């Protein structure tokens, strides 16, 4: 006759097998949707571009671009100098300038090599036969990474570093000042190491090293504190949720390999509210555009960091209160020991 413990094992093992068989395909489907679907639907959606030149010619260009089913958000500029300034301040991705010498296209491959190529193809297709459109790359991508491949690929390792930081802080059960100290220390060191590699080995970063290191540290802190905070509040399920949001949603929705305005809605706007998207945009701003356009992403990352650190503090406080109550409960409810 089997013991009760033995008879209970098969149902438990069976439930575990069913859980694995069902959960893994669900995660695979979610990953395929999150990574492949946005990439398969790349197209301009309210992409900010400029037109400049004489009023009549600029108005005609603006009308032609605006007629493309909401593909472009067209902004008028007084002249080529104003259009260049808007590109350098990361306000538009490019501009079409009408001049006496013929049409000229201004691009910024540092903002997005994909968008720069898209604008070249769009303008070439619109120009009359035999018309040569001069192209000037106002803010060029670094020669070592002309397609932005290395820059885009760097986001996933940094996201994983943030997730690993949060998991370790949660798993080690760090309390009091040790949890935020560990999160901050790991974030600062990760930012410093990543910038050293980005300037040295990879040669894809070209901005101020302090600003870049601060950006990557803030990105790591935002992700790490979020994962650790969810773990402190919800346990293993919270850690899994944090990793899921960051890796399976945040990275493919970031638009760092293309541009947020090329992703289908609501993926593009949503991605900029998640740490990877905000971090990628902020890093691009401080690296290639002297910090222009970095304020919004910095605010998003700061908000995630504050919320994550707050969740860590609340979770640890609740755990401490629960352990104290458990220890004190039996003492209060214990009956007096009978006299011998």
Image (tube, rainbow, N blue to C red):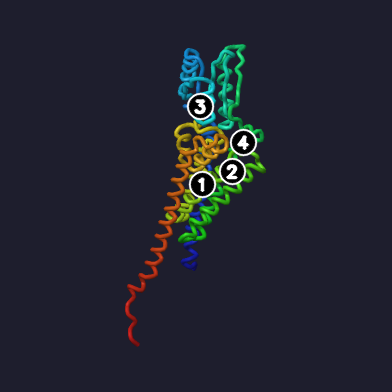
Residue sitting at x 57%, y 47%: 191
Circle 3 packing at 10 Å, graded few (<14), some (14-19), many (20+), is many
Q: Position of residue 248 (x, y in %)?
A: 51, 43
- Depth-wise, is mark 3 or mark 1 nearer the camera? 1
Marks 3 and 1, the one that precedes in the sequence? 3
Find the distance from the CA under tag 2 to the CA under tag 3.
32 Å
Asked if the residue at tag 4 contacts the one at tag 1, i.e. Cβ–Cβ closer than 8 Å, the answer is: no
**Cα distance between the residues tagged 3 and 4:** 20 Å
Between label 2 and label 1, give the one nearer the viewer. Answer: 2
**CA–CA distance in space, label 2 to label 1:** 14 Å
Q: Position of residue 319 (x, y in %)?
A: 42, 61
Q: Which residue is mark 2?
A: 209
Residue nearest the observer in this picture, 324 or 53 = 53
First reached walking from the N terminus: tag 1 or tag 4? 4
Q: Give the mark nearer the N terminus: 3 vs 4.
A: 3
Q: Is residue 272 above or below residue 20?
A: above
Q: Is residue 281 left or right of residue 307?
A: right
Rounded to the nearest angstrom, the CA distance separating label 1 from label 4 is 23 Å
SS type, badge 3: loop
Residue at x-position 46% and y-position 23%: 70
Image disc number at residue 44: 3
Residue identifier under label 1: 218
Q: Residues within 10 Å of mark 2 (few under 14, many from 20)?
A: some
Query: Contact, CB < 8 Å: mark 2 with mark 3?
Result: no
Cα gap from disc 3 to disc 1, whole angstroms: 30 Å
Quadrant including the C terminus: bottom left
Give the x, y percent position of residue 172. Answer: 52, 60
Residue linked to disc 4 = 149
């Amino acid at each position: 006759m089997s013991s009760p413990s033995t008879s209970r094992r098969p149902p438990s093992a069976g439930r575990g097998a069913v859980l694995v068989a069902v959960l893994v395909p669900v995660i695979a489907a979610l990953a395929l949707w999150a990574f492949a679907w946005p990439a398969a639907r790349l197209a301009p959606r309210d992409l900010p571009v400029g037109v400049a030149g004489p009023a009549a010619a600029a108005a005609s260009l603006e009308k032609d671009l605006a007629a493309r089913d909401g593909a472009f958000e067209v902004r008028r500029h007084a002249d080529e100098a104003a259009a260049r300034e808007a590109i350098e301040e990361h306000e538009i991705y490019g501009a079409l300038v009408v001049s006496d010498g013929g049409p000229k296209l201004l691009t910024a491959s540092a903002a997005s090599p994909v968008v720069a190529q898209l604008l070249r193809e769009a303008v070439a297709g619109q120009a009359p036969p035999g018309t040569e459109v001069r192209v000037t790359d106002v803010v060029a991508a670094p020669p070592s990474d002309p397609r932005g491949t290395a820059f885009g690929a760097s986001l996933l390792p940094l996201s994983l570093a943030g997730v690993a930081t949060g998991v370790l802080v949660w798993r080690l059960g760090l309390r009091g000042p040790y949890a935020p100290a560990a999160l901050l220390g790991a974030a600062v060191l990760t930012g410093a190491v990543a910038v050293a590699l980005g300037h040295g080995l990879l040669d894809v970063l070209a901005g101020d090293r302090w600003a870049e290191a601060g950006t990557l540290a803030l990105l790591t802190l935002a992700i790490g504190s979020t994962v650790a905070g969810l773990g402190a509040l919800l346990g293993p399920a919270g850690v899994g949720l944090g990793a899921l949001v960051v890796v399976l949603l945040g990275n493919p929705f970031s638009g760092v390999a293309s541009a947020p305005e090329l992703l289908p809605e609501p993926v593009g706007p949503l991605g900029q509210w998640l740490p990877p998207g905000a971090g990628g945009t902020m890093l691009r701003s401080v690296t290639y555009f002297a910090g222009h356009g970095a304020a919004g992403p910095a605010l998003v990352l700061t908000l995630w960091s504050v919320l994550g650190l707050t969740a860590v503090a609340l979770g640890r406080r609740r755990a401490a209160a629960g352990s104290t109550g458990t220890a004190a409960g039996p003492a209060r409810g214990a009956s007096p020991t009978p006299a011998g």
